[in-house]
Amino acid sequence: MQSVCVPAGLTPDKVEAIDLSSRKAQVFNSKATVFEAGQKLSSVYAIKSGSVKCFTLNESGQQQVTAFHLVGDIIGLEAIATGAASTYCETLETSMLCEIKLGSLFDQNIDGVHQNLIRLLSQRLSHNSRQYINIVSTSAEQKVASFLLLLSEHMQQHGRSPAEFKLPMKRTDIANYMGLAIETVSRIFTLFKKQGIITSDQSMLTILDRKKLHNRSVPFTTTE
Amino acid sequence: MQSVCVPAGLTPDKVEAIDLSSRKAQVFNSKATVFEAGQKLSSVYAIKSGSVKCFTLNESGQQQVTAFHLVGDIIGLEAIATGAASTYCETLETSMLCEIKLGSLFDQNIDGVHQNLIRLLSQRLSHNSRQYINIVSTSAEQKVASFLLLLSEHMQQHGRSPAEFKLPMKRTDIANYMGLAIETVSRIFTLFKKQGIITSDQSMLTILDRKKLHNRSVPFTTTE
DNA sequence: CGGTAGTTTGAATTTCATCAAAATTTGTGG
DNA sequence: CCACAAATTTTGATGAAATTCAAACTACCG
């Protein structure tokens, strides 16, 4: 998961405080487009609730998922340098996003917003690096285990249960994101279920044995 | 390759101009440690010449390469948020690095250095995203082709020949970075040689047929 | 020139993708 | 609230791709 992190020092709330004119959150239906690749973008968006996926399209229209973002994340940061979005971004469920005009972050250094933004971006780089390690790992089992643990951590950091949460994305998206076939992801889920590591009721996931899950995950990204 | 990019608006030279006291570049021998994971870091480093690899270590001492950085890159950006390096960083050859104190970037917004740093970080995110796509692609051949093209682009952006350059890293490191076995990387190199796409004399690489190489690369990351 | 590190090549094995079909879940209209 | 259709997930069988193991070969360094 790229940047499923609490943006320390630049929480959505703090950022919103900068630009009062755009503090109101907008509601997006499920599968709504937040922005498109190449689109001129002069804002970033804080996710107040819900979740989104970011992806690119190749010439034959196939998706490649590059990131999932959940509550508390800020999206569109990649567009600051060029002024244009580098990926498509679509809600995975009904979501509330708060638009933050870049001008408000750039023009004046109110309340140290520059430093906060720099820290947020730096933090995002660390998270990307960690996610990179998860993906590069050769075993599909490790990839899926690490993916679930990262989601779980994010939930915990946002005051939710790390043991029980909803997976907003389809298996297809997970598979695509992890560079695996959907069948492989499915098989690993059933394997973990049989081994009593997780259970799932519809899209609710329960981590029964965190330790075992951790043992199956990528050894480089140990936080616990 | 994470961030093999010209940091537009924050070239090493520009950044150095901020903090005159630390403008002098230091020479690092090959295989020298620039910083270690967990080490307190209050500077970033601009690569004036040479190259480095960043990696993590797991409990059994195995490396996982997370990035290569070449001339023109700035390293240590991931440490800004936490104040501590998140990876080890080692030179791949004799290199010259220029230390840039973070204080000089943070304290005052001289010459819009804040905005420049923000742009640089944002740009890095885009590059990571692109590299992510290269890695997630399922075919080993695509991974290696994309890797070579990305290196080539970086060389061009730094005024060097995009068709002929030195690979500073070992096959082992490339394989590790791409999540492949070293034998697989080797086999793909020989395949590309047999097909007249590349040649290599020792560590010098020559791209003979850029178009073919591009056809073999990941379809999502097309710049050309 | 000899020894070590690094690379290449071949053969056997494992892992994962693909294809096909069944089972389950989700969404919709009555 | 239920029934039906569509979408998604699961499961099994097969094949392709990449890893592993082993050994030979080459470059590099004192």
Image (cartoon, coloured by chain):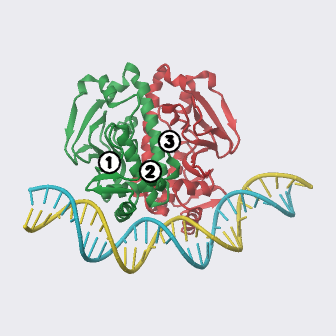
Chain colours: A red, B green, C yellow, D cyan
Mark 1 belongs to which amino acid? Glu
As measured in the structure, the alpha-carbon distance from the residue carrying label 1 to the one carrying label 3 is 41 Å
* Disc 2: host chain: A
Q: Position of residue D27 (x, y in %)?
A: 21, 59
In the image shown, does A84 or D11 lie closer to the viewer?
A84
* Disc 1: host chain: B
SS of the residue under disc 3: loop
Q: Is residue A152 visible?
A: no
**Residue at 37% from the left image edge and 65% from the top image edge:** B187
Mark 3 belongs to which amino acid? Cys
| Residue at the disc numbered 2 | A132
SS of the residue under disc 1: strand
Q: Is residue A39 visible?
A: yes
In the picture shown, does residue A198 fall above or below D23?
above
| Residue at the disc numbered 3 | A5
Count numbered badges in the picture: 3
* Disc 3: host chain: A
Dot in front, 1 or 2: 1
Q: Residues within 10 Å of mark 3 (few under 14, many from 20)?
A: many
Q: Is A149 displayed left or right of A21 in the figure?
A: left
As measured in the structure, the alpha-carbon distance from the residue carrying label 3 to the one carrying label 2 is 15 Å
Q: Position of residue D16 (x, y in %)?
A: 51, 70
Dot in front, 1 or 3: 1
